[in-house]
Image (cartoon, rainbow, N blue to C red):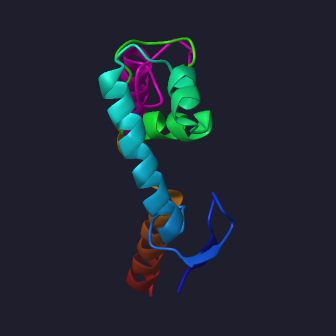
Amino acid sequence: MDIRNCKRCDRIYQYRGSKYCPQCTIELDEIFIKVRDYIYDNKNATVLDVSQALGVEEDIILEFLKQGRLELSSPGLDYLCERCERPITTGRFCSDCIRELDSEMKKGFKDIASSPKSLGRDSKRMYTAEIRKKRKGH
């Protein structure tokens, strides 16, 4: 049983994959619906506009955007790529940074796949080869 503290209210709860307790999860889902509906009705709203109109903390709205649950209709200066700080509408990174990160990840996996086998495996083979030589020699 994994027990954690809720990131929002600090209550203890049984962890089941969410960083929030069941009560805060329900409250955040209700807030999400309000925010989503407001953005739908006010397409050019910024994070600050939504926060002030609904009385919802900006951090909560930003978390919804980072999770990809919400998308702003146009990039604003209040929501930026975590890597290059260009304005974005949803997620954590702009499309250019996503492409660059994807390319770097693929290159890294290719480098790992083409690198020599791990030292542990080579040393086992050497040990086995030495044993065979000793057996033949005796």
Up-down: is 109 above or below 90? Answer: below
Residue 93 counted in the magenta span: yes
Q: Nearer the viewer, residue 110 or 82?
A: 82
Q: Nearer the viewer, residue 47 or 19?
A: 47
Q: Locate residue 119, reporting x and y percent.
A: 52, 58
Up-down: is 4 above or below 24? Answer: below
Up-down: is 6 above or below 3? Answer: above
Q: Residue sitting at 60 percent across and 33 percent down? A: 58
Q: Locate residue 128, reporting x and y percent.
A: 43, 75
Q: Locate residue 6, reporting x and y percent.
A: 62, 65
Q: Nearer the viewer, residue 99 or 25?
A: 25
Q: Does residue 39 appear in this view?
A: yes
From the viewer's perspective, tell me whether residue 82 is left or right of residue 42: right
Q: How many marks?
A: 0
Which residue of the protein is positioned furthest toward the right in this rendering?
10
Residue 12 counted in the magenta span: no
Up-down: is 96 above or below 25? Answer: above
From the viewer's perspective, tell me whether residue 33 is left or right of residue 66: left
Magenta residues span 84-109
Q: Residue sitting at 41 percent across and 33 percent down? A: 105
Q: Residue sitting at 42 percent across and 68 percent down? A: 125
Q: Locate residue 48, reporting x and y percent.
A: 57, 22
From the viewer's perspective, tell me whether residue 81 is left or right of residue 112: right
Q: Residue sitting at 44 percent across and 88 percent down? A: 138
Q: Nearer the viewer, residue 13 or 26?
A: 26
Q: Does residue 79 appear in this view?
A: no
Which residue of the protein is positioned furthest toward the left in this rendering?
40
Residue 68 in which image quadrant: top left
